[in-house]
Image: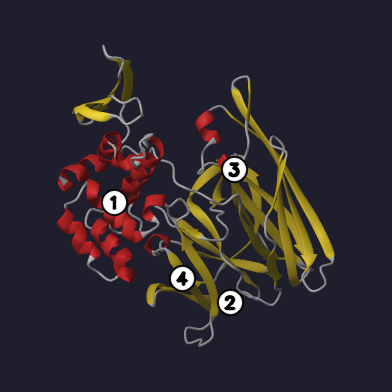
Amino acid sequence: MFKKFSSLLIIFFISGVIYAQPVVSKILYSDFIQLPTDSSETIYYTYKIPLNHLVFEKESDLFLAQYRLSLEVFDSANQKFITRAIKEKNIQVADYEQTNSSYIFSEGVLELNLNPGTYSVTEILYDYKSNKEFKLPSFKEIVDSNQRIIYPIIVSTQQMECNSAKSSVLSNYGGHLPFDENEYTFVIPVKNPKPDSLFVTIIQNKDTLYSSKMDRPEEERIKLNECGGKLIIDEIPGVSNYSILKISGVSNKIKEGPFLINVSVHSDDSNPEKLQLKCDWIDKPRSLVDPEIAIKALKFIEKDSVISSLLSADDEKYGQELAAYWKKIDPTPNTEFNPLMQEYYLRIDYANKNFNSIGGLNGANTDRGKVYIKFGKPVDINRASDDHGNIIETWTYNNPQRKFVFIDKKGTGEFSLING
């Protein structure tokens, strides 16, 4: 059964289609990116808002939303008002499904010039369509002119074309490295005087994932812009008061959780600049959040003896046992992220959301849920009534060719499999 499931799921994985929506609970992802200038520090405030947190109205064939994001900055010591920045945006999409999406975003950037100090920052999101205001908890931001190694900027290695030029796209998840199948580059500004070389290590759970002597950093300026609905980084060659250190080829080796980037001028430096970061699975399926529940959810493809064996480990090792189980069939074994594992639990999420019945049966445990978890979304769903007025639902698959017929005999939305 498991080998059969694996081959079917890999077919859907290769096709590049994932149908279930991940769960994103945050209203707003934001980050401060600090770049030194001659007299003050240039601060780029970047943000992204999932579209499902905005209210849309339909006009003709389009769905429209509008919001205002205000940023209020105070001196932390005396709460004296320093500055305010505002961004207003109109959004239009043609597909209703996009308005409910937690993985399609409206992104933006605001530029501030702040003197060194500690600031209290408040974000206020106003939705014009609902006439509602969301004031998020204030947080502290430290602008440090003495810090030589600036906090990393995380960008995608896949570039996009903007104004006839190739630009890097900001990952923009609150300064966190996304845990996914994409590859990212760490862009680290280094204040002048420019060193001849730098020594960099990346450490997670006491394991050294990366260690290298980096050549003299490139001298260029960075500017953040918006293009095509994305935030991009333009690299401008020329003299500036900082240099750019880039680290690539390591992001896919980093697991969920905190990690450390150490940067030093000398290889034997006992006190390197320590940059604390976190790798975060932004769109983690809900059914995968609790490792014990995730192991029990293997019942749709595995024998009870296998599940019992996994659960025989100590509670704190459930996550490791689950990861080891899925690693055996990982289509990308050289990376930490397992897209096959994600697809399975996304299907469980989808089944739980869409196939619950009035009788209270969990969606994943229904006949339709079980078929969906094993085979994914059908290419065609046909509904009809039989001679007794019962609803008949037929699911058709092309690869492999299968047909499943379900009937709702009680009129409660609980469809039973009668053929397949």
Please state if 395 lies on the left or on the right of 251 as rendered: left
Mark 2 and mark 3: span between their CA atoms? 45 Å
Mark 3 and mark 4 lie on one chain; the one further toward the N terminus is 3
In the image, which disc is placed on residue 259? 4
Q: Secondary structure at mark 1?
A: helix
- At horizontal 59% and vertical 68% (from top left) the residue drawn is 151
Mark 4 and mark 2: span between their CA atoms? 25 Å
Q: Nearer the viewer, mark 4 or mark 1?
A: 1
As displayed, is residue 151 above or below residue 342? below
Residue 285 visible in the current orientation:
no
Q: Secondary structure at mark 4?
A: strand
Mark 4 and mark 1: span between their CA atoms? 30 Å
Q: Which residue is mark 1?
A: 297
In the image, which disc is placed on residue 195? 2
Residue type indicated by callout 4 = Phe
Residue 350: x %, y % from top left = 38, 40
Residue 302 visible in the current orientation:
yes
Residue 375: x %, y % from top left = 26, 36
